[in-house]
Amino acid sequence: MVNQAFARKYFPGEEAVGKRILSGATNGKEGSRMREIVGVVGNARQEALGAEPEPIYYFPYKQLSWFIGTVVMRTEMPPLRVESAARAALGELDRRVPMYHVRTGEEMASAAVAQPRFLMVLMASFAGIALLLTVIGLYGVLSYDVARRRREIGVRIALGAGRGKVLGLVFREAMRLVAAGLVLGIAGAAGAARLLESVAFGMPMDQAAIVAGASGLMILTSIAAAYVPAARAARVDPMQTLRSE
């Protein structure tokens, strides 16, 4: 039996079943001999999940009996509850064959994705810190700008500018800064997309949706950060401001 990667690599555009190959693996003193392909199976990753499937051929166990075999069992009850029964069944077949390193499918899957999961958590942590710094920085810049333009805002209010216009003045300044940041961020997202694809193996990466979601989150948090300075500007007392000046 060969996998799909084997068939595509060595028999492109042809039917692999019925072809004969000279395998490198042998069973004892038999030596190498031509073997016929009788079926094509799906690809199964043997090593890192992020790597492309390798060409693989499979032998019946009795034709390669020196190899260390792995038995996979599907159960309707918790897997570890059938371990003793599996050991007993194996002992009845051959008491000389040891059974060791028993693991559940969940444990194997968790170990296989441990490193990518760590990288994703690390990246998410950095993203959260970056978002927090953005909110704090935007709040600080707008607060300073409102304090610096306090007299101007007081004059605008004295001349009839309503609360909505003052809020719009501060929010427009905030959105100008956010827009500049989004332009730079989207440009950097093109390079980060390759890193995400290497970590999120086996998952289609919809870059447009990711960029749109990140941009929307950035805009919402920026509006929240700008609200306090904007509300403070809208509450400026023009008479008190002009007297202090």
Image: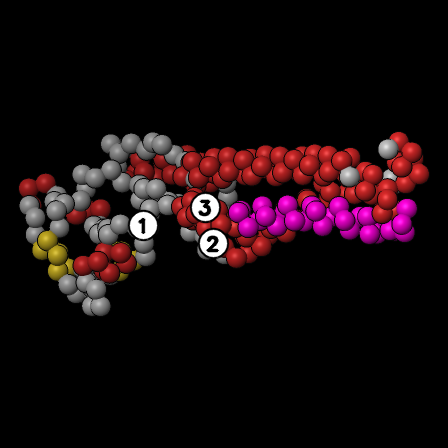
Residue 61: image tag: none
Disc 1 designates what residue? 52
Quadrant where the N terminus sits is: bottom left
Judging depth in this view, the residue of 13 and 171 nearest the camera is: 171
Residue 192: image tag: 3
Measured in 3D between alpha carbons, the distance from the residue under mark 2 to the one under mark 1, in whole angstroms, is: 17 Å
Residue 214 visible within the image: no
Measured in 3D between alpha carbons, the distance from the residue under mark 1 to the one under mark 3, in whole angstroms, is: 21 Å
Measured in 3D between alpha carbons, the distance from the residue under mark 2 to the one under mark 3, in whole angstroms, is: 12 Å
**Magenta-colored span:** 158-185
Amino acid at pointer 1: Glu
On the rendered structure, is 206 left or right of 218? Answer: left
On the rendered structure, is 86 left or right of 69? Answer: right
Amino acid at pointer 3: Ala
- On the image, the x and y values in percent for residue 148 come to 76, 35
In magenta segment, residue 182: yes
